[in-house]
Image (tube, rainbow, N blue to C red):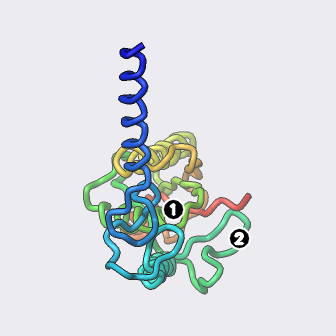
């Protein structure tokens, strides 16, 4: 009987200690640490339900809006995203002739895209293109490979979910510059991004 009583006392003490930890409020803002998204607010600061200073939340929202407005993408239904855009951004990933390997020189495009993807949460269609040199069947496969390589980097190196991206190869069907000179062909060897509207 004494043994059973001791076990009950110990288990009650442990459960009370567990409850105390669940409701611990280190920064004394009225929001328990387990639910506190901003754990270092100043004492006496008025916070929202997440434990964040409303001004801090407004600053974060402003930063997100600034990042979103830095890039404008065409959508799958012919509009622009975000709706505040007036002109499509010229961001794309470029490739060497007849290659699908992504070059280190394209890192800046990925960094911009990474920042944008982190605040928008929208799905993208990655559309691969080639210049007009070579057989149509080869260019079609190459353009799809380029889109798949960009998706692989976004998933494996930047940690985005694979189901957020679809890939498509257009071969040499949609040039954005003349294929009659080297500069134009270089512009045509690319992967572009479309926001998928569902």
Q: Name the residue located 34 percent from the left edge and 75 percent from the top edge.
A: 41
Q: Quadrant of the C terminus?
A: bottom right
Spot occupied by residue 8 in the image (x, y as percentages of width and height): 43, 25
For label 1, the SS is strand
Q: Earlier in the sequence, mark 1 or mark 2?
A: 2
In front: 146, or 4? Answer: 4
Spot occupied by residue 150 in the image (x, y as percentages of width and height): 43, 50
Determine which residue is flagged by label 2: 78
Q: Quadrant of residue 44?
A: bottom left
Q: Quadrant of residue 193?
A: bottom right
Determine which residue is flagged by label 1: 192
Which residue lies most toward the left here?
104
Q: Name the residue located 29 percent from the left edge and 54 percent from the top edge.
A: 103
Badge number at residue 20: none
Q: Name the residue located 65 percent from the left edge and 67 percent from the top edge.
A: 75
Whether residue 70 can be seen here: no
State the CA–CA distance, disc 1 to disc 2: 14 Å
């Amino acid at each position: 009987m004494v043994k059973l009583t001791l076990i009950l006392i110990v288990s009650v003490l442990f459960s009370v200690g567990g409850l105390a930890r669940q409701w611990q409020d280190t920064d004394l803002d009225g929001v328990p640490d387990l639910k506190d998204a901003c754990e270092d607010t100043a004492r006496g600061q008025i916070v929202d339900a997440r434990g964040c200073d409303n001004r801090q939340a407004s600053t974060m929202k402003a930063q997100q809006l600034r990042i979103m407005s830095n890039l404008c993408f065409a959508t799958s239904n012919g509009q622009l995203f975000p709706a505040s855009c007036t002109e499509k951004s010229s961001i794309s990933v470029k490739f060497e002739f007849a290659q699908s390997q992504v070059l280190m020189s394209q890192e800046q495009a990925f960094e911009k895209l990474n920042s944008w993807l982190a605040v928008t949460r929208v799905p993208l269609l990655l559309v691969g293109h080639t210049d007009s040199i070579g057989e149509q069947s080869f260019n079609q496969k190459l353009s799809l490979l380029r889109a798949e390589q960009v998706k692989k980097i976004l998933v494996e190196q930047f940690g985005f979910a694979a189901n957020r991206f679809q890939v498509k190869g257009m071969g040499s069907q949609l040039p954005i510059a003349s294929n009659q000179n080297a500069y134009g062909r270089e512009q045509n060897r690319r992967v572009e991004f479309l926001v998928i509207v569902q």
